[in-house]
Image (tube, rainbow, N blue to C red):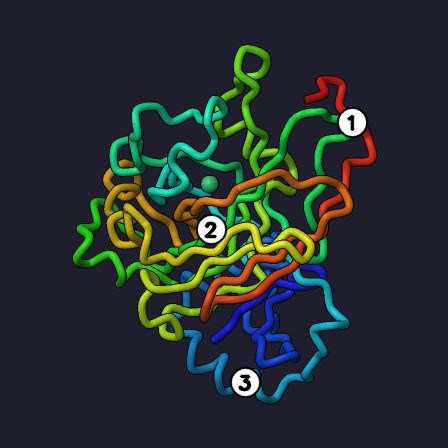
Amino acid sequence: MKLAVFDDWRIGVVEGHAIRDITHLVPDALAQWPKMRMNYIIENWAGLKDRIERESSKTPSLDLANIRLRAANPAPSHVFAAPANYRKHIGELGARAVTKGGRTAREQGFFLKAPGSLTGPSEGVRLPNGSTRRFDHESELAVVIGRAGRNIPRERAMEHVFGYSCLIDLTMRIEPGVGEEERSMRKSFETFTPLGPWITTADDVADPGALKNQLWVDDDLRQDANTSDLIVGVSELIELVSSVLPLTPGDVIATGTPEGVGPVAPGNRIRIAIERVGDMSIDVTQQDVRSPRPY
Ligand code: MN
């Protein structure tokens, strides 16, 4: 099943080019916190799945072309992310690399992206106004956590997966000697985490370790890899993160980017496609306002 967030943070089931609104299955109380609706659906999935399948066929079918897709989960408690997790990506950034000595995600662990940086296809990416820095695309499979857990051994990790989504880890690169900000900040500008176009539930993705991971800028194929090349796979990432703190339903883990990262500029359209998971296009524009502390 494919679950999406659209318009004023409504929940829908996607079937082909149509979406069926199932927001009425979420308690009215969450109208006060509409971005939390997807977390509610995920946390209560066991009790909701049959109802959603039964009732979604009765609600009106809307054309995807006529709605605005938001981030697939707009308000996870955490967005964890793996650095240096595909061999061929390690080293391609040269002097701009933060990772030294060939260390991978297995040695470095995870970093965080601010949940406030999430965006969806209808909102796109807005680069800082007037910046001369380099901003790169990173094409990543995102894991969405279903069941909470702490100290989850990798053998049990897949029981905690709700589904998968496409994630672009937009990144402001360091400029050695000029700008060497912390990784989490450089990756947390507003709109720097496109997530979508929906969450594909885990039962539709037999093996997350065997999926094509591709990204285009305009018509140019920039990244073309397979999650079989992940150094730390999905189950080990869950073990790694949950060894530090509890995983919460709706949490997102960005699994890392393969080789081929490169710059984007206002006017570009980025397309990410992950096999069996989804295909999403994101427009790159620029913020209207120049920040008091520009980058
Ligand atoms: Mn990344």
Which badge, 3 or 1, is on the more N-terminal residue? 3
Q: Nearer the viewer, mark 3 or mark 1?
A: 1
Residue shown at 55%/48% (left/top)? 168
Q: Please tell me in which quadrant of the rendered image residue 219 appears.
A: bottom right
Instruction: Write down the residue under mark 1.
Output: 130
Residue shown at 64%/65% (left/top)? 10
Which badge, 2 or 3, is on the more N-terminal residue? 3
Q: CA distance from mark 3 to mark 1?
A: 49 Å
Q: Are marks 2 and 1 in contact (CB under 8 Å)?
A: no
**218 above or below 206?**
above
Instruction: Write down the residue under mark 2.
Output: 140
Crowd tier of the residue under label 3, counting other residues whose Cα lies within 10 Å: few below 14, some 14–19, many 20 or above? few
Which sits in the foreground, 185 or 46?
Answer: 185
Name the secondary structure under disc 1: loop
Q: Which mark is residue 171?
A: none
Q: Is residue 82 left or right of residue 223?
A: left
State the image coordinates of residue 171 (x, y, percent, origin top left).
56, 35
Residue shown at 68%/84% (left/top)? 60
Q: Amino acid at mark 2?
A: Glu
State the image coordinates of residue 173 (x, y, percent, origin top left).
56, 28
Residue shown at 24%/49% (left/top)? 236
Q: Which mark is residue 55?
A: 3
* Residue 78 visible in image: no
- Residue labelled 2 has its Cβ within 8 Å of some atom of ligand 1: yes
**47 above or below 103?**
below
Name the secondary structure under disc 3: helix
* Residue 154 visible in image: yes
